[in-house]
Image (tube, rainbow, N blue to C red):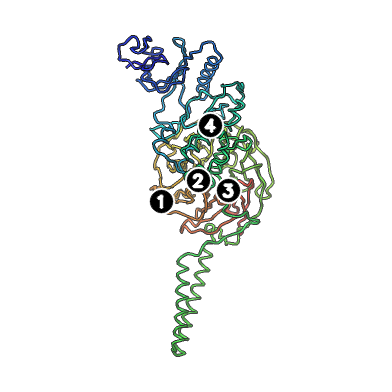
Amino acid sequence: MICCLNPDCSNPLNPNGKKTCQNCGTPLVPLLRNRFRVIRVLSDEGGFGRTYLSEDTDKLNERCVIKQLAPKFQGTWSQKKAMELFGEEAQRLQELGEHAQIPTLMAYFEQDNCLYLVQQFVNGENLLKELQQRKSYSAKDIQAILLDLLSVLKFIHDRGVIHRDIKPENIIRRKSDDKLNLIDFGSAKQLTARVQNKTGTSIGSHGYSPIEQIRDGKAYPASDLFGLGATCFHLLTGISPFQLWTEQGYAWVSNWQEYLRKPLNAELAQVISKLLATDIQQRYQSADEVIKDLTRKQPLILPPATKPTIKTPKQPKSSRRKYTILRLLILASAVILLLGFDESWYKQIRRLQTSLASTLNQEKKNSANSEAVLGQSPKIALGDITLANTIKAHDESVLSIAISPDSKTIASSGDRTIKLWNLATGKEIFALNGHSQRVNVVAISLDGKTLVSGSDDSTIKIWNLAKKEQIRTLYGHTDSVHALAISPDGQTLIDGSDDNTIKVWNLTTGQKIRTLAGHTFWVRSVAISPDGNTLASGGFDKTIKLWNLSKGRLIHTLKGNAQTVTSVAISPDGSILASGSRDRTIKLWNIATGDEIRTLTGHANTITSLAFSPDGQTLVSGGRDRTIKLWNIATGEEILTLTGHTKTVTSVAISPDSKTLVSSSDDATIKIWQVSR
């Protein structure tokens, strides 16, 4: 079949071989630009042209989408504006490059007095059609949609582009991998651009576009976020924001929860309310802010602590059983006494009770001593970990910390800076500046000479600590870098990024060795085994992957976490992998076999960070429940809990000399915990 390109043709499909359209008489074009075969109409643009499904004959008939601009009103302001927007859409797609969730621009040309824009075809259905089929979305579905789309919005906003028309029709779920794709950049504008406030020139969709865009013709990153909130509302309620807008303007926004079919959890409801704020100043200002609330925010589980406290775990069941036996014996002896047994029998019972009590008390004492160990050398009693210092480190969150090999210096990252601190005194030594956006992670080489940092600006920077200067910047990622690890020999750097990839670098030369692709969502943690042969990575796809580092080959994919894997750590002997997750559990894995050893439970919210003690016998974990927990690796039992941070614990580290535990938090502080001998 040949499709007629007259946008007014009511029956555009024609049999092959026809020269003119059998319906409207327009000459038929077998191939646009001698390359693209138009198959059928996808949508009508209301007098300005149509969108067609087509084939690219230069690429083995690969499917593509062709947008046609053929305005009827030649020479009018509307035609001029339409051509301007059409050209800007092509320009935006060209500037955005090849993001995996944005259709790639393939061609842009003029033919027969019409403009044509050719872009990659996304095989799937938009969210409006998906809603019509499935009828409802859960809170979990909405959170997944938000996280998927926020990464795309972050990408375009970082490149100075605003979409201006976020709505279910412009979001397609790709069938091959279920990833959400953002389409229709015809309304996209540069951040610095302004649209004249003329009647009929508002760009966007009423109900989905915020008041500053509809009323004033101005758009910002926060404007797209309103559209995202309105989209979530539509999916949750099945009610079109356009319908509500026509009836009551923006009044529905203030009571949007009344339209819900069932209540949402408080955290997600709060996020959507902030997305839908009518006043732009009260709305989220960036995708990063929303991502932070979705992935780091926690309910008020514990009241702010006025001073650090130590909680001992519940007594093991075995001990409780022993005390139950003792109580039964005591009760039995009382019964015997009441029944009138003679005095000699009573004395024997008393001796038995005394003996059992002595034995059990000794066992209790031994158990307490055993549980108080942070490894076997040195031995640490429960009361011997004390808060030595609290550092007000950064203006906002402290996202990452690392301790130097000589146990004398702490490196921290938070805003756009990296700071070095004297561990003994808590005094700032110096700061390193160079990243253009938030610094998410820092790592120090085992020789103590090199510091590496990863940032939301998609770069990695390598610093000479002795000279306090930047050595080089590594480029290659298309999204934030959140994880770093340096090989024991100091020759290799590994990173994990929100572009779903891991890159392996030569730390000395800065040359990229290879890219490891396998995760289907953000990679947020990496760890290297002590022999430098094995790499572990964890991501938002709920999996842990073990890689042969020298060959770049995937060894195992470990599945068992119900939610995002937030942290991974490898024991000093290289035999055990620990993973932390948003499902509030810590799992221990046998690295050689990939088998799960055991699951540790005790945190009341997401585990954010893990660290093994230098002797490998204790694991330290930090969480969004504001606590730090120490675990006995051999038994899986909780040793103790440290509290004192007033917000999420973002990172934990143990000094190589085992004398100090350091933690950082969203409360903008670093806490130094002293381990007494």
Say whether disc 4 or disc 2 marks the residue closer to the N-terminus. 4
Residue 494 in sight in this render: no
Instruction: In this rendered view, identify the residue nearer to me: 96 or 113.
Output: 113
Q: In which quarter of the image is residue 41?
A: top left
Location of mark 1 (residue): 596
Which residue is rendered at x = 62% and y = 24% of the image?
A: 192
Location of mark 4 (residue): 246
Circle 4 crowding by C-alpha within 10 Å: few under 14, some 14–19, many from 20: few
Say whether disc 3 or disc 2 marks the residue closer to the N-terminus. 2
Asked which secondary structure carries label 3, the reply is loop
Location of mark 3 (residue): 648
> Do the numbered discs 2 and 1 sit on residues whose CB atoms are within 8 Å?
no
Q: What residue type is labelled 1?
A: Glu
Determine the CA span between mark 3 and mark 1: 27 Å
Q: Which of marks 1 and 4 is in front?
A: 4
Q: Nearer the viewer, mark 3 or mark 1?
A: 3
Quarter containing the C terminus: bottom right
Residue 359: horizontal and vertical position, in percent? 49, 74
Asked which secondary structure carries label 1, the reply is strand
Location of mark 2 (residue): 567
Instruction: In this rendered view, identify the residue nearer to me: 243 or 646.
Output: 243
> Do the numbered discs 4 and 2 sit on residues whose CB atoms are within 8 Å?
no
Residue 166: horizontal and vertical position, in percent? 51, 30
> Do the numbered discs 4 and 3 sit on residues whose CB atoms are within 8 Å?
no
Q: Is residue 303 above or below residue 127?
A: below
Determine the CA span between mark 4 and mark 3: 42 Å
